[in-house]
């Protein structure tokens, strides 16, 4: 307080400051009250800090991570993933629940439809936005898991996921979810007839029914890798 009062006295009396005296006063003021300058930005190379043992710095906003150098980015840019029988392609399908070539078509279609509508998080490539949506839906990951993978904030991930759902419902659902008619309906019916389900044109869900007297000729077709009993899907 004494130094502050001395500064006020100098200003009141119109006396010019000595540079070293001014530096000392400002240094003492900062040491006693680091927030004395309010929102003024003070750089480390300013004159008043050159002889000061204590430097007050502002919190600098963290730069956005380069997602292409993350594990996901390296995976989808690898050459091996283009081979559907490669280890990378199998890992991608296991983690995101669709083949990589289908994912590429999905990316192009989403770009053309602009499902994210260029609102918020535009600096994040659409490939990663789609991967976030697919990972949450396919593997039931939470935002904190993906934040750990990609170093993106949880609130940003929630926003991207909501945009992903809204865009798919608005632009892609009407295109792919509908009741077939005409020749397309006949093609679908023929597929089900070849499987022993005449008159069927689609299924919303299925259940496994135990079949005790399954014919031997189709025994392998009715034995799953997780169910030891003979069964058929209805």
Image (cartoon, rainbow, N blue to C red):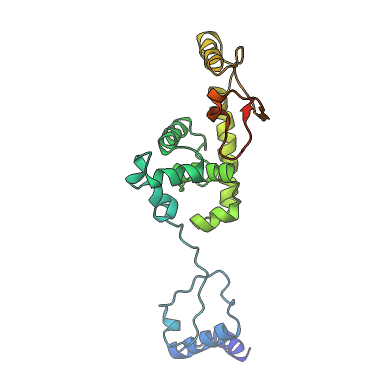
208 over 164 or under it: above or below: above
- Image quadrant assignment for residue 232: top right
| Residue 51 percent across, percent down from the top left | 43, 88
- Tell me which residue sits at (60%, 20%) in the image: 202
- Tell me which residue sits at (54%, 56%) in the image: 147
Which residue, as the protein is rendered here, is positioned at the far top? Answer: 182
| Residue 91 percent across, percent down from the top left | 45, 47
- Image quadrant assignment for residue 39: bottom right
Q: Is residue 212 left or right of residue 106?
A: right
| Residue 16 percent across, percent down from the top left | 47, 87
The quadrant of the image that shows the N terminus is bottom right
Nearest the camera: 116 or 216? 216
230 over 144 or under it: above or below: above
Nearest the camera: 224 or 57? 224
Nearest the camera: 190 or 65? 190
Q: How many marks?
A: 0
């Amino acid at each position: 307080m004494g130094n502050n009062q001395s500064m006020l006295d100098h200003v009141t009396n119109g006396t010019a400051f000595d540079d070293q005296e001014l530096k000392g006063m400002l240094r003492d003021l900062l040491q006693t009250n680091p927030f004395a300058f309010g929102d003024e930005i003070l750089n480390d190379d300013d004159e008043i800090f050159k002889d000061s043992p204590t430097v007050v710095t502002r919190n600098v906003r963290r730069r956005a991570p380069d997602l292409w150098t993350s594990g996901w980015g390296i995976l989808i840019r690898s050459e091996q993933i283009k081979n559907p029988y490669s280890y990378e392609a199998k890992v991608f399908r296991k983690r995101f629940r669709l083949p990589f070539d289908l994912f590429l078509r999905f990316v192009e279609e989403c770009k053309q439809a602009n499902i994210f509508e260029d609102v918020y998080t535009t600096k994040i490539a659409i490939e990663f936005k789609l991967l976030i949506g697919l990972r949450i839906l396919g593997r039931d990951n939470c935002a904190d898991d993906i934040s750990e993978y990609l170093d993106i904030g949880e609130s940003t991930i929630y926003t991207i996921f909501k945009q992903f759902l809204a865009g798919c419902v608005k632009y892609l659902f009407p295109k792919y979810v509908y009741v077939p008619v005409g020749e397309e309906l006949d093609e679908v019916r023929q597929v089900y007839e070849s499987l022993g389900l005449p008159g069927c044109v689609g299924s919303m869900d299925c259940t496994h029914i135990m079949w005790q007297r399954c014919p031997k000729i189709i025994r392998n077709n009715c034995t799953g890798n997780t169910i030891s009993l003979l069964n058929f899907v209805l």
